[in-house]
Every structure is written in C-alpha cells, then in structure tokens.
Image: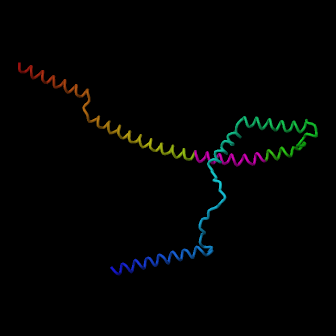
C-alpha cells in the first residue's frame, strides 16, 4: 500500500510539472509552437462556395440563351447607333468605340470563369451520376445472373418431374393392364 501512495504522489508531481512546462512554453513567444486561438471582435463572413457555384450556374445558363443574345445585340446596336447618330455633345464613346470594347472585354473576362465553374460543377454531378448508374448496372447484372441461375435450376428440376403427358400415358397403360387382367378373370 505505501508503494501505491508514493506512485500516486509521483504521478501528481509529474502532472503538475508537465502542466507548469506547458504554461511556461505558452507564455514565451516561441515560433515552433502555434499560438492559441484568439477571439476577434470583427465578424468574419462565411464564404459559401456552393451558393457562389449555384449563382455562377444561373449566370452561365442565362449567357447561353437566345434572350441574352438578343439583349446583347440590342445593347450593342443602341450603343453604336447612339454614338454615330446622336448630336456630338451627347456622344460618350466616339467611333473606335473604345469604351464598348472595354465593356465587352470585361463581360467576357467574367463570363469565361463563370462558365468554367459551372462546367466543373456539372462535371462533378455527372461523375456522381455515372457512379450511381454503374452501381445500379452492377446490381442489375447480378440480379439477372441470379435469376438466370434460378431459371436454369427450375428447368433442371422440371426435367426430373413427371409431366402431364407422361402421367396420362402411364395411367392409360395401367388401365389397359387392368382391363386385360379383368378380361382374363372372366
């Protein structure tokens, strides 16, 4: 018993020493030890990648519609028409249409990554659907093989069972034998 008391005291002492060492290590600014998390006053906004992906898909879908092409064509025609036929004092983009080129380049520079993001999300969905289809196909194939084995087993079992025609012929031959025996007795 005294030994157990000493080992418990030793454990307490070692535990307090380890806690003291941890406290000292935290208090020093060592570069090899990560700092504890601090609470920040400013709230960090949570970035929802899925929501941004859904938004990019909606934009990409709209960019691929005829409605977008009609809107874009009407806007460009109005822009060019205004800057050619309007009085010179109200024109905002002269003939080489530099501002129009800049606006179209900006639209294309945002449209391309959004379309790629939407395509990547669609590819991920297609991959998941492909894996599901492959699993369903494997289960269906296993079920068909099982049913084929069962049908083969039933055919083999039916081959060993007496058929209706066989039973009729046997009964007819027994009836004929009975009739001949009865004829012999009389």
Q: Which residues are magenta?
A: 106-125
| The furthest residue to the right | 88
Residue visible at 47% across and 75% down in the picture = 15
Q: Which residue occupies the foreground of this view, 29 or 177?
A: 29
How far across and how far down the image is residue 106, in percent?
Answer: 78, 47
Q: Which residue occupies the foreground of this view, 155 or 37?
A: 37
Please identify the quarter of the rendering in which residue 78 is found.
top right
How far across and how far down the image is residue 134, in percent?
Answer: 50, 45
How far across and how far down the image is residue 143, in percent?
Answer: 41, 41
How far across and how far down the image is residue 135, in percent?
Answer: 48, 45
Q: Is residue 16 left or right of residue 127?
A: left
Q: Is residue 98 left or right of residue 2?
A: right
Above or below, 73 relative to 40: above
Quadrant location of the N terminus in the rendered image: bottom left
The main secondary structure of the magenta stretch is helix
Q: Which residue occupies the foreground of this view, 165 or 51?
A: 51
Residue visible at 67% across and 48% down in the picture = 116
Above or below, 179 relative to 135: above
Please identify the quarter of the rendering in which residue 5 is found.
bottom left
């Amino acid at each position: 018993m005294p030994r157990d008391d000493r080992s418990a005291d030793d454990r307490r002492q070692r535990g307090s020493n380890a806690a003291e060492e941890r406290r000292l290590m935290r208090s020093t600014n060592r570069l090899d030890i990560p700092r504890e998390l601090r609470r920040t006053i400013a709230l960090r906004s949570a970035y929802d990648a899925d929501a941004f992906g859904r938004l990019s898909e909606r934009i990409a879908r709209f960019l691929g519609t005829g409605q977008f092409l009609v809107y874009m064509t009407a806007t460009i025609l109005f822009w060019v028409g205004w800057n050619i036929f309007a009085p010179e004092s109200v024109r905002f983009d002269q003939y080489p249409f530099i501002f129009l080129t800049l606006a179209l380049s900006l639209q294309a520079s945002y449209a391309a990554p959004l379309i790629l993001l939407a395509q990547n999300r669609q590819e991920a969905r297609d991959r998941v659907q492909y894996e599901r289809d492959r699993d369903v196909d494997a289960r269906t194939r296993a079920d068909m093989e099982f049913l084929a084995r069962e049908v083969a087993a039933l055919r083999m079992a039916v081959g060993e069972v007496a058929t209706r025609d066989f039973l009729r012929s046997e009964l007819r031959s027994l009836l004929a034998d009975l009739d001949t025996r009865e004829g012999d007795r009389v």
